[in-house]
Image (tube, helix red, strand yellow):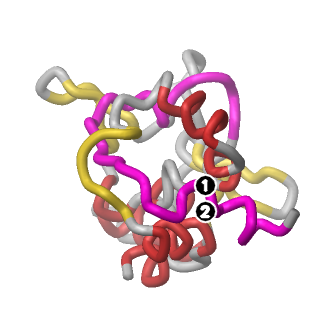
Amino acid sequence: MSKETEGDWYAKGLSFTCTQCGNCCTGPPGYVFLTPDEVSKIATFLGRKDGALPPTELRRVGSKLSLTEHKNGDCVFLKQIDGKRICSVYPVRPLQCRTWPFWDSNLDSPATWKQAARTCPGIDHGRKHNYVQIERARLAETWEEAER
């Protein structure tokens, strides 16, 4: 079955609004991959003149770059602010984060979407995203593609 056919289940759109719970920024060990340009944007946002992130925030995974995690699984940029767990670099967060929850693993079937909703209170609530918007996010390779 092609991905286009598989996507028929969400052809009428899906609802999602971030609640700033931080659940997508924690959990079992994993990777948040980012490009060198995204590294530079985060570093600039943080006021780092050299455009780099230290090893406490960035690691190499094979030929890729990934944000680091604390021992409890929290992303290094997940912070507790005013009772919410929020991304401290949200305006310049990596593409992988920008496209949540519209990832192939969540959009594979209604069951995988519902499974993601168990840990993400924003899924099935709030803003309605139409099929074109979902596909744009799912297939995005740049920030601009994800934000259109």
Q: Amino acid under label 2?
A: Leu
Question: Which residue appears farthest toward the left when viewing the image?
Answer: 82
Q: In x, y percent, where is residue 4? A: 72, 71
Position of residue 9 in the picture relative to residue 92 (left or right): right
Q: Label 2, on which residue? A: 34
Above or below, comparing residue 34 to residue 30 in the picture = below
Label 1 or label 2, whichever comes before in sequence order: 1
Residue at 76%, 61% (x, y): give it: 64
Q: Kindly identify the amino acid type of the residue bearing the numbered disc 1.
A: Trp
- Residue 9 lies in magenta, yes or no? yes
Instruction: From the image, tell me which residue sits under label 1.
Output: 9
Looking at the picture, tell me which residue is in the foreground, 4 or 120.
4
Question: Residue 61 location, x and y as percent?
Answer: 80, 51
* Quarter of the image that includes the C terminus: bottom left
Task: Answer with the quarter of the image where residue 43 lies.
Answer: bottom left
What segment is highlighted magenta in the picture?
A: 2-30
**Residue 20 screen position, x and y as percent:** 28, 36
Q: Quadrant of the N terminus?
A: bottom right
